[in-house]
Amino acid sequence: MISIPEKRVFSSRLLSFLLGISMFFLLISSSLLFRIGDNSFVPKSIYNLIVDSSVSNESKSITCKEMCPKSKPIKPLPSCNPNQAILKVFMYDLPPDFHFGLLGWIGKQNQIWPNVGNFTEIPRYPGGLNLQHSIEYWLTLDLLSSKTQNIPRSCSAILVHNSTQADIIFVPFFSSLSYNRHSKIQGIEQNSTNDILQEKLVEYLKGRDEWKRFGGKDHLIMAHHPNSMLLARWKLGSAMFLLADFGRYSNEIANIDKDVIAPYRHVVRSIDANNSPSFEKRPILVYFQGAIYRKDGGVIRQELYYLMKDEKDVHFTFGSAIGGGVRKASTGMSASKFCLNIAGDTPSSNRLFDAIVSHCVPVIISDEIELPYEDVLDYSKISIFVPASKACKKGYLLKLLRGIKKEKWTEMWENLKQIAPHFEYEYPSKPGDAVDMIWKAVSRKVSRLHYKSHRKNRYNMSQQFLNAH
């Protein structure tokens, strides 16, 4: 028997150990590269499912046992029970030109919808700032998945195929995408694709029995981008709109009594609640980066800029999404205690929701702002509201924020970590995420609609009896 020198054995073991460590860090680095760049289409939930599907159950259990012994096992959501849905939704089968066709999707002959059960067949949504108004995309996917087997999801809304059984009629027109991508006139055309689609939509809806039944009051139309549906909104104003705010609408067309305010889809990366920087680890007192010279109510940005730009613990500067602007904003917000949300061309912006997922306490300076889910969510527990007139007084805003003690800030920071998941758009949807919260908000509006309808019908039956005799 040949004996191996002890030094050679030790060297071989050391070499094997070093190779194992190198492979480990290589795998971790590759995973991080896949996840960086949250501006692309692929949602984290889809990314996880795609990655997990390539790993066997056996290898997954071994990996978790070795690499994450402290993590809790993930419990899959049970299949959705249609009887548990709080909202029954009928969706028009509009041609793809109105929805996924705007993303370049082309189905098979007579195919209206993509197969949402196969994630590789779901069209990509454009990244960058397009994402902030992508609400129409997430809600439509969620409805389609409610009739797709083996997709565990939130059960707030369920698709029904009989409009008389529905609580709400859903209009799947991707109006924000249509505006962003197709509002310019091309070549020798006299009208833009966006205008043509709006005209066709009005003609289609006005001819439907579902619209005629209640004059469109039980229809849900998505117009999240403030410039979307500019032509059609006047003709379809009886419907329930899903909006970012009421900044460019008359009160007759859009108001808080009938319409739903939905959050922007944030563009900065979300911070994990367990790794969120605390008070001491956020050296910047106040953060704002964006367009400073705006029209209408946005002139306040300019005034605040000149009041605060030279303060040493304040970051107030120009910025845009290009040139790494989103990445810089992610880093800056996570290093700041307070993030300014100042009115721009419209009362709202995605900056508020970027702040929320960064756990940076929002300072809202926008007198006309409307906030998502405010009937069930108390924003005073996570935000500081400052009237525009007071914010523009020299020294007022900084004195106010510097006077907020660590204990109070930490309380609001903890609340932010708790409510941040309500502003995450995911597919498949999860209980309490943005999709789920929007459906619940729609349900509450529908209840009010039915209430008014039932009150109006109090004496109708008596009149029918009299007419019969």
Image (tube, grey):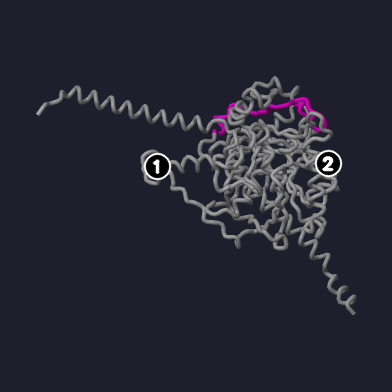
Name the spot of residue 108 as percent of width and height, x first.
Answer: 62, 45
Front-most of residues 169 and 148: 148
Asked which quadrant contains residue 194, the reply is top right
The stretch drawn in magenta includes residue 292: yes
- Report crowding for label 2: few under 14, some 14 to 19, many 20 or more residues within 10 A (C-alpha): some
Horizontal side of 457 relative to 326 (left or right) equals right
Q: Residue furthest bottom?
A: 469
- Report crowding for label 1: few under 14, some 14 to 19, many 20 or more residues within 10 A (C-alpha): some
Dot 2 amino acid type: Leu
Name the spot of residue 51 as percent of width and height, x first.
Answer: 47, 40
Q: Quote the CA–CA distance across marks 2 and 1.
A: 54 Å
Looking at the rendering, the stretch of residues picked out in magenta corresponds to: 277-304
Horizontal side of 316 relative to 72 (left or right) equals right
Counting residues from the start of the chain, the first of labels 2 and 1 encountered is 1
Q: Tell me: residue 100, above or below residue 161.
A: above
Dot 1 amino acid type: Cys
* Of marks 2 and 1, the one in the foreground: 2
Q: Tell me: residue 13, above or below residue 107.
A: above
Residue at 52% in and 33% down: 35
Residue 450 marker: none
Q: Is residue 415 visible?
A: no
- Residue receiving disc 1: 64
Residue 231 marker: 2
Query: Dot 2 lies on which element?
Result: loop
Asked which quadrant contains residue 341, the reply is top right
Q: Residue furthest front?
A: 109
Q: Is residue 268 visible?
A: yes
Horizontal side of 323 relative to 194 (left or right) equals left
Front-most of residues 152 and 201: 201
